[in-house]
Image (cartoon, rainbow, N blue to C red):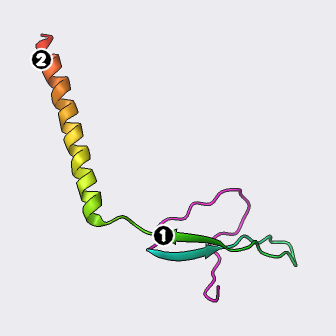
Amino acid sequence: MSAARTIFEGTGTRLFVSGLTDGDYYFTIADAAAGAAPSPPLHLAVMHQSLSRALWLTALGALVFAATVFVILRGARRER
């Protein structure tokens, strides 16, 4: 926690953090009141999937989309 930095100050019950690289992160919540102790650290491990898996899943999604469009257009042509 030696390189700790504040990422949010204010009120609220939720926080969304994006853009983290692979690695281990620790978060604490501290009350702004004087003398309030911070929460115990929450450990977050970020591990992104491989680029090749992401590209294969994108290609599979494109194939399913194209097949769906083909079936819809073929059915519409038969109805004429």
Q: Is residue 72 left or right of residue 6?
A: left
Q: Amino acid at mark 2?
A: Arg
Q: Nearer the viewer, residue 18 or 68?
A: 68
Q: Earlier in the sequence, mark 2 or mark 1?
A: 1
The residue shown at (15%, 11%) is 79
Residue located at (22% from left, 45% from top)? 62
Residue 65 within the segment the image draws in magenta = no
Residue 30 image offset from top left, x and y in percent: 76, 72
Q: Which residue is mark 1?
A: 46
Quadrant hosting residue 74: top left
Left or right: residue 56 versus residue 26 is left
Position of the N terminus, as image quadrant, is: bottom right
Label 2 CA crowd tier, 10 Å (few <14, some 14–19, many 20+): few
* Residue 80 occupies quadrant: top left
The reply to whether the C-beta atoms of the residues labelled 2 and 1 are less than 8 Å apart is no
As drawn, 29 above or below 35:
above
Q: In the structure shown, which secondary structural element does the residue marked by tag 1 occupy?
A: strand
- Dominant secondary structure of the residues highlighted in magenta in the image: loop
First to last magenta residue range: 1-21
Indicate left or right for 24 with 15 as reference.
left
Per the model, the C-alpha gap separating discs 2 and 1 is 49 Å
Amino acid type shown at disc 1: Val
Q: Name the residue rendered at 60%, 87% in the picture.
A: 3
Q: Which mark is residue 77?
A: 2
Q: Is residue 6 above or below residue 2?
A: above
- Residue located 22% across and 31% down the image: 68
Q: Which element is circle 2 on?
A: helix
The percent position of residue 20, horizontal first and vertical second, equals 47, 71
Relative to the observer, which residue lies in front, 36 or 50?
A: 50
Placement of 69 over or under 13, stated as above or below = above
Q: Is residue 19 magenta?
A: yes
Relative placement, left or right, of 6 versus 59 is right
